[in-house]
Every structure is written in C-alpha cells, then in structure tokens.
Image: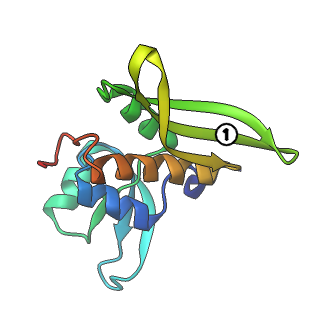
Amino acid sequence: MFDVKKEVPSLELCKKLKEIGFPQDTGGWYWIQNPIDIEKYSLMFLSEREYEFRLNFAFGELIKAPTIMEIIEYFNNLNLQEYSISIKFDIIGMKDCIKIYLLKKELLNHYSALKSFEIYNLKDLTDNLTKMLIWLVEKAYIKLNNKEK
C-alpha cells in the first residue's frame, strides 16, 4: 500500500526547505496547515492551479513536500562544479544500506568526503537527501534559485 509519508520529507524538514528557498510554486504534494487548528498539517496533492487557488484565498500555510524523485531530480539539476554526490549500495551488519556522500574534487580527480549518510529504509533516504540539500545551502556550497545568499 502506498504511503506518501514515506515518499516525502517530514513536515519539519519541509519547513526548513521552504525557509532556505526551495521552490514552492509547483504542483505536487504539500503539507497544508489546518486553518482552524494551526498546529495541524495534512498532506495533500495539489495541481499548480489548485496551489494558486489555495494561495490566493489563504486556506492556511502551504509547504511543498517534494517526493524522493523530485529531490533526486533537483540534485541532478544542480551545478556543483567541484563537488559530486555519490550514492553507493552496501551491506552493513547483514542489512542493505545506501550510503550518500558529498565529495569534493581534489587534485588529479581524487575526491574527499565532506558529508555522508547511511540509510536503511526509504523514509531515511528521503529525509537524509533533504538534510544533505539543506546542509549544502547552509554551508554555502550551493544557492537555491529562490534564495539570495
């Protein structure tokens, strides 16, 4: 059974993505604030038209919840120049593991790891790719299109 909460980052990470300038104006999954109980959010799929309608009529805060594929696509579209993202599959302690590395190109095409994550399930993959993107922006390795640094 499809569980969208495993496919998108947590509400807290999505709030951070919004804060650092991740694009919010496309269709897709959104955390939508309940206009009556502002502490509650629910996930809803919105077309671009539905997004604009809700935005114009103030139905509560809208926070983009990018899917894992949207996050991977975003990484693929980044121009990291001297940096590289590496994803490797491994087995650690009899468990399948995905390792994500941010690598910095050194002399003679050698790379050194700046940041890495070990991931054991899909939700961890989604959240850790999001954390990697946030870390890259906060450390000024990249600038998001919507954010001036």
**How are the residues colored?**
rainbow
**Where does residue 99 sit, x and y in percent of width and height?**
63, 40
Query: Which residue is found at the position 41% from the left and 67% from the top?
Result: 12
Which residue is situated farthest in the top direction here? 108
Total number of numbered discs in the rendering: 1
Left or right, 99 with respect to 16, comes to right
Whether residue 46 is visible to the viewer of this picture, yes or no, is: no
Query: Which residue is found at the position 37% from the left and 52% from the top?
Result: 135
In this orientation, which residue lies closer to the viewer: 57 or 103? Answer: 103
**Residue indicated by mark 1:** 98
**Residues packed near mark 1 inside 10 Å, few (<14), some (14 to 19) or many (20 plus):** many
**Where does residue 76 sit, x and y in percent of width and height?**
40, 27
In this orientation, which residue lies closer to the viewer: 30 or 116? Answer: 116
Left or right, 109 with respect to 24, comes to right
Residue 61 lies, with reference to residue 120, above or below; the image says below
Query: Which residue is found at the position 26% from the left and 52% from the top?
Result: 51
Helix, strand or loop status at disc 1: strand
**Where does residue 75 sit, x and y in percent of width and height?**
39, 33
**Where does residue 77 sit, x and y in percent of width and height?**
33, 27
User: Which image quadrant is residue 36 in?
Assistant: bottom left
